[in-house]
Amino acid sequence: MLSTSRAASRRRRHSLPILAAALALAAFGAPQAAVSQSMGAVGGPGSANYPLAARFAPYKIRELVKSTTLTPRWIQKTDRFWYEWETTQGMTFWLVDPALGTKRQIFDNDRIAAELTRLTRDPWDGQHLSIRNIRFISDNTLQFEVQSSEDEEIRKEETDTLQQDQQDKQRQRPPRPKKKVFHFEYDVATQTLRQLEDYEGPDNHPRWAGVSPDTAWVVFSREFNLWAMTWEEYRKVLDARRGKSGAEADSAEWKLEGLQEIQLTTDGERDYAYGTQGRGENDEETLKEFKRRQRAGISWSHDARWFALTRQDRRKVGDLWVVHVAGDKRPKLESYKYDMPGEKDVTQTELLVYDMRDRAMKKIDDKPWKDQSMGVYSDPTGRGPRGSGAADTEEVPITKWLSSRSDEMYFFRASRDLHRIDVMVADPTSGQVRTVIEERLNTYQEQLPPRRLANGDLIWWSERDGWAHLYRFGSDGTLRNRLTQGPWHVDAIEGVDEARGWVLFTANGREQGEDPYYRHVYRVGLDGRGLQNLTPGDSDHGAAVAESNRFLVNNHSRVNAVPAAALFDASGRKVMNLEEADFSLLTAAGYRFPEPYTVKAADGVTDLYGVMYKPYDFDPAKRYPIVAYVYPGPQTESVAKAFSTAAFEQGLAQFGFIVITIGNRGGNPDRSKWYHNYGYGDLRDYGLADKKVAIEQLAARHDFVDMDRVGIYGHSGGGFMSTAAMLVYPDFFKVAVSSSGNHNNDVYNRWWSETHHGVKEVVGDSGQVSFEYDIEKNSDLAANLKGHLLLTTGDVDNNVHHAGTLRMAEALIKANKRFDMFVFPGQRHSYGTMSDYWYWLRCEYFVKHLLEDSRWSADITQLQVEQPKTR
């Protein structure tokens, strides 16, 4: 088996470093048990600080925070942008011209409020401007809307339709009338406002529309097949959706009759569909979705002759189910396909190219590996919305091939174990396929879409030397040069400026003396020379780059500082400071910043980075229970770097806890490949030793940490990890709250489990390929439980199925263990509308079992007083 011997070897490797770390801790200070008995321990009946915790509950602390991140809205075909910023004085709107280095307020708030009051007859003032949907239609002219207090007049036929819709959903209350919306046009230069009486909103493109580059065709999927309509017919759809959004726009579109559509394929079937076949909240809704237009997931050649797509065959994939017992008159079934790890019958992917001229489909034959995955590379700089900076564009969203040549369709293929990834190019006319770049590694690999230069060269992201860096390859696969190198991590390409000869990218870990997770924006020449940090400073830097690549907005912050934003040009010159967050309400309420810290991993070598949250009434002369909030990775770690309210951690701390987050080897991918892949083959236990040793170091460092009272909690992967901690180190971790955990990864989805734990490809004597998979599960260690454990799940969680939680519960019962369990009815993976209830349930479990404060009432009064009484 793949994991058994590897995991045993890993545990042997752990033992000596852990012992060494324990010996080192003895040198740091006396064991916690030897701390002076005069040091009072926080705990006992009435010890939990409910008033302070209620004041800083997540739904309360968020009310104290205004704008912390600036999102630029680039004005089409310019470097100018506008943004909105909220402080305790209200919302203001700003227009920035980077070339001139100027920033001006778009509205005189008091003046525009007076004009809106006069025109709408609703009262407004300058501190309370509810202006929505701002959209620049030219350099100095914008349009926006406001909502009236008056109801909109609804025609009888619309009322009948609304009532029918309500009846269809088994709701008996009458439809609520819509509020009237006023539309305005505003000239920034002259500050003049004009009401638009016959306003027609911009095009509202549905997600299913695969528009061709020449805007002649729109391709989509319906009832498992591909269909097309002309641009003229599509305009009817846009007209029906105009001025509407969400379900209202979809409903208006569905009611259209007589649209002329052309069926392109006829062999599609359920679970072997072209494009997205559709899926509803339950089986009844899924059947309806099949008949509606769906996204085909296509990418067009630039000349609009071809489009490419992948088709997935899931007919042999096993089904999974959840039952909706809440919210419907009669419980309803939801069925869906779900690949589980190690299974023989998994999703099969094929790559297709369709010829719009000849109306013919071709399959790209690339001599596939068994159970491989495939995908088409598209041009990230194509027409249509681009990131957060395209709010004002009216360009049609079009997805085009990476290459502008119609005989170069770039795609990737990846082996099931992800040890092999190839960048490929196909000629759809001849069907010829060739390999451009090969990636090989003995653990799983990740990839980012390449960037293609005008001469055909590719900028490619790779971890082939153990760190994520950028490489430049010729179109024939020849490595021309490296753009970056060294013991640091390139995170993403932000822009390529061929005219000036540079690449803008985000990276971390390069600046000495900083937290290695802090991001910066860098510039490097296409020849690999002239590397420059454009956003210096010991904090995290998140950038939004203009489409011209000449300017960038830099949001910089850290967990223990006030966030701010500044404008830079591509040479690294700061053009101007833009904003600093208003923390006056937070400060007045008694908020305190958390404290970053660094400890060593269980190997005594690797640095781990964490954040500590203390009660705001913290007394260093007292001893507090310590609770770790965990997420094991490998996609990320639960450690904030940029400013965050960290509302759940901060809120829990106020009861009287020290709450920490801490990384672990095998966690965040933004370090070395070794660090990221540390847990490969040992997915249950790999991060636990680091969590334990980190808490031991903090206890040795701080007398206020009570190492006899250690709690741990997490959600999803964190739910899995927190339960594992109670079973692997049952004498150390005393209390765990584990929500929606993938406790048994043999029933969690194949992509996550096989990727991060590994699956072994076996080639038989006859050349037949099969896959072997084995993984250690939390339920295997159920007999080890000693402390208090609360398991929770949502009963319609279709991500981490509740089977994992129930199997964990079954194992505990068979082991004759006491534990607690809670099911959230009608809730998905994140508990949705019950999240506030979940917050109090989790906190009070730690209050009861770590603080020994057992106050109880049937009423969660802290929630009840927050709800307005309507009856």
Image: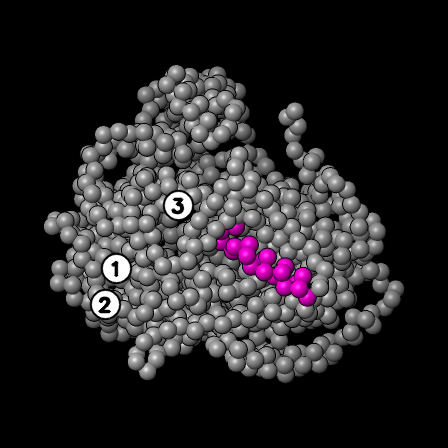
Residue type highlighted by circle 2: Asp
Report the front residue among 595 and 443.
Answer: 443
Circle 3 is placed at which residue position? 279
Circle 1 is placed at which residue position? 351
Report the front residue among 616 and 845.
Answer: 845
Residue at image position (30%, 79%) is 767
Q: 170 above or below 433?
A: above
Q: Is residue 802 magenta?
A: yes
Left-right relation of 273 to 540: left
Residue 320 drawn at (x, y percent): 46, 54
CA–CA distance in space, label 2 to label 1: 9 Å
Report the front residue among 374 and 514.
Answer: 374
CA–CA distance in space, label 3 to label 1: 22 Å
Label 3 crowd (10 A; few <14 / some 14-19 / many >=20): some
Q: Nearer the viewer, mark 2 or mark 3?
A: 3
CA–CA distance in space, label 2 to label 3: 31 Å
Circle 2 is placed at which residue position? 366
Q: Is residue 10 magenta?
A: no
Q: Quadrant of residue 240?
A: top left
What type of secondary structure mainly makes up the magenta span?
helix
Marks 2 & 1, CB-CB < 8 Å contact: yes
The boundaries of the magenta stretch are 797-815
